[in-house]
Image: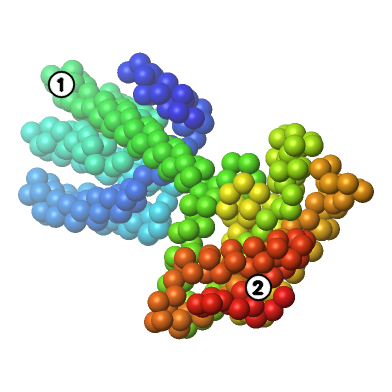
Amino acid sequence: MLSSIEKGLARPWYRLRLPKPLEARYAARGVPGGTRRIRSWLSIFVVFNVLSLKVDYDMFGADAVAVPATLTLCVFVPLALLAILALRHDAPPWRQTAAVMTTSLVDMAITLNSARIAPGPHAEVYLILAAIIPLVVGMIAPLSFRHAILYCGACFALYVASVVGFALGGPEGVGIPLLVASLILVPLKLAYAHEWETKQSFLLGLREQMQADALAEANSRLTVLSETDPLTGVANRRLFGERLESAWESAAGDRGWLGLALIDVDHFKAFNDAAGHAEGDRCLREVAGALRSAVAARGGLLARYGGEEFVVLLPGATPEAVIVLGEALHRAIAALALPHPGLPDGAMVSASVGVTAAHGATRRWGIGPADLIAAADEALYEAKRSGRDRVEAVCVRAGASAFAA
């Protein structure tokens, strides 16, 4: 997409259309405030045409003013009011153009008819007014260049046909009226320049937005990378530390529980020595996947703590709940049934789990996140000392004692 945008920005001045996908996107954005601007213009023109009846009265006199007055009040004004009603909501461009063209052509036709029937010296005034109408409207109405060609072409054709057909140039000929008619084509240049600038602004805005999105996506990827263990795909120790601090603050504020579990793959060095580091990495990935499923079901956070150690943070876990969590983690690894090549007699990969939990109220006694980690680490050490492949639990307090095993 960025290459298409750059291509569009570098296109020559005579190529108004954008590359196809961008042109469709530009067209879909619409013209903000277009219908509101046209409705305002139509309202002003209704008032202008009604006030111009005084000019008609002065030029035609009381007897002849009936024709332009009738055409203005009975044809143009109702038509303009219908156009305003048709543009009450955000109308599509074709409807905007249809409203502008219809009202302008009718207003021009009425003005050219006044030029035809006006007393000799006054005809030129109406000829000039008939050319000014499409000029002013074309400059005000937000028409695309394509619609401006249609609009100006129709108005120019009506003007020239009326001047030539009714010989409105008088004795001097039609040269001057036709020169005046060229004013009708001025909006073409304005519409082209406006659409060119609008499209350039659209492309620049789109490029800026895409670059901002790309930067945000890159920053998001960097954030994920900075918080994720590259081998196992779970959270890394850095993110765990941040979440532990935050979770303990919440537990202290809500007077709730916070559970912690440390998991260590048993005899992992022997596994690596026997099978190699590649198989050891595969083993850790499978262990992480099994632990992730068990933790996700309870809404906790799993992180790689280092080497073959994993840690689980479980907000709201009471001492009983954290023991249940530890048993679930222990079973999840056993269910993998991964052969351990570094142990005899077809042994399987197992894990030792140490769990602990603390209540937020203990913060007033000086208990902090480091004490939870120390207690979980003590429980893990107890599991290893007791023969591994088991779950142990320790309370978070001085002279920690087991609350379950």
Identify the secondary structure beneath mark 1.
Answer: helix
Task: Give the farthest residue toward the right.
Answer: 345
What percent of the width, then of the height, locates residue 225?
A: 52, 43
Q: Is residue 31 left or right of residue 281?
A: left
Residue on which the image places disc 1: 176
| 3D distance between C-alphas at marks 2 and 1 | 104 Å
Residue 215 or residue 231, whichever sits in front: 231
Numbered disc 2: secondary structure:
strand
Nearest to N terminus: mark 2 or mark 1: 1
* Amino acid identity at mark 1: Ile
Percent position of residue 390, x then y: 76, 65
| Residue sitting at x 63%, y 68% | 379
Residue nearer the viewer, 140 or 31? 31
Is residue 147 something one can see in this rendering?
no
Residue position for label 2: 393
Relative to 313, is 5 above or below? above
